[in-house]
Image: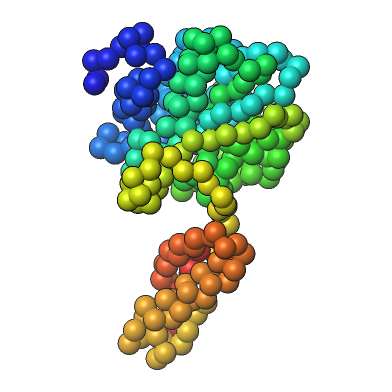
């Protein structure tokens, strides 16, 4: 399959899979797929997607956060937007996010071949959905939607680099992000790989979602005297994690809450538990 050419299989499932393999090889790490916001790896992936958009006849623009958007049609008409995210979590699957971008490009190719393009259509490759580097998700789509919070520029990654500095290093103008107006859209449609077994189990090629889960992140800190926690230090941690999970899951019936527990204390005879939910 790796020898198939784009011209031979344009707009087909085979081309989508070949392109997914190609994108999946662009990573920050040699042994696994990791592509976080404002990294050279994400910039290279954006360059490749921009080239494919141009080949599909789209006019391409990139914003300060790294979103890559291709458009065709009347500039004065609200577009139908297709797409997904180009960033990944550490050790990601190659279809998470990228599949939605590549399928959108295939749709454009098919519609153009049939002379059936709508009045306005955009394909969006968002630079950040996962929040893997700066701890806040949806930074890419927030910038596109005109609701980017200026304070987010001061977010700091694990290496002490601010989002502002990371964007500047790649040539972006971070100050412009907070002044983007809300776009007028005809609609938004995203195809996404199912991260579960239901479609495969049911023998179905595709499903339509009836609800969507967002992300909310919080930190809970608690401490116990050593006699309470010393025998089974994980018990208070587990209790705090479960309490956080239950409290946050009450926000939405579609919410899934994952807890990460760190134990640290500089105070004698106290076991301090920090739960990041």
Task: Give percent across and percent down for residue 157.
Answer: 50, 46
Task: Give percent across and percent down for residue 75.
Answer: 71, 15
Q: Is residue 238 above or below residue 208?
A: below
Q: Image point 53% across, 30% down: which residue? A: 83
Q: Is residue 24 above or below residue 231?
A: above
- In the image shown, does 48 or 150 lie closer to the viewer? 48
Q: State left or right for residue 70 relative to residue 23.
A: right
Q: Is residue 2 visible?
A: yes
> Most extreme residue toward the bottom, as rendered?
227
Count of marks placed on residues: 0
Q: Is residue 61 visible?
A: no
Q: Image point 42% across, 76% down: which residue? A: 238
> Most extreme residue toward the front, as rendered?
203
* Quarter of the figure that contains the N terminus: top left
Q: Image point 57% across, 52% down: which residue? A: 211
- In the image shown, does 31 or 225 lie closer to the viewer? 31
- In the image shown, does 225 or 88 lie closer to the viewer? 88
Task: Give percent across and percent down for residue 113.
Answer: 49, 9
Q: Can you tell which quarter of the image residue 152 is in?
A: top right
The colour scheme of the drawn protein is rainbow
Q: Image point 40% across, 91% down: which residue? A: 227
Task: Give percent across and percent down for residue 239.
Answer: 46, 79
Q: Is residue 86 above or below residue 254?
A: above
Q: Can you tell which quarter of the image residue 164 is in?
A: top right
Q: Can you tell which quarter of the image residue 33 is in?
A: top left
């Amino acid at each position: 399959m790796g020898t198939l050419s784009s011209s031979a299989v344009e707009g087909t499932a085979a081309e989508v899979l070949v392109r997914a393999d190609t994108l999946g090889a662009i990573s920050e790490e040699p042994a696994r797929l990791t592509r976080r916001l404002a990294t050279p790896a994400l910039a290279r992936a954006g360059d490749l997607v921009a080239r494919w958009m141009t080949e599909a006849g789209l006019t391409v623009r990139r914003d300060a956060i790294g979103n890559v958007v291709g458009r065709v049609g009347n500039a004065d008409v609200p577009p139908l937007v297709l797409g997904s995210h180009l960033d990944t979590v550490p050790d990601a699957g190659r279809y998470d996010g990228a599949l939605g971008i590549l399928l959108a490009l295939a749709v454009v190719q098919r519609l153009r071949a049939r002379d059936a393009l709508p009045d306005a259509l955009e394909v969006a490759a968002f630079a950040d959905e996962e929040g893997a580097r700066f701890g806040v998700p949806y930074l890419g789509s927030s910038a596109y939607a005109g609701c980017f919070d200026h304070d987010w520029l001061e977010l700091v990654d694990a290496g002490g680099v601010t989002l502002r500095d990371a964007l500047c290093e790649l040539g972006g103008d971070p100050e412009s992000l907070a002044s983007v107006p809300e776009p007028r859209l005809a609609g938004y449609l995203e195809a996404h790989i199912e991260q579960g077994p239901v479609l495969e189990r049911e023998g179905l090629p595709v499903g339509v979602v009836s609800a969507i889960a967002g992300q909310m992140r919080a930190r809970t800190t608690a401490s116990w005297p050593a006699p309470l926690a010393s025998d089974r230090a994980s018990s208070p941690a587990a209790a705090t994690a479960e309490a956080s999970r239950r409290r946050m899951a009450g926000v939405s019936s579609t919410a899934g809450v994952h807890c990460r527990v760190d134990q640290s204390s500089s105070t004698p005879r106290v076991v301090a538990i920090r739960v990041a939910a």
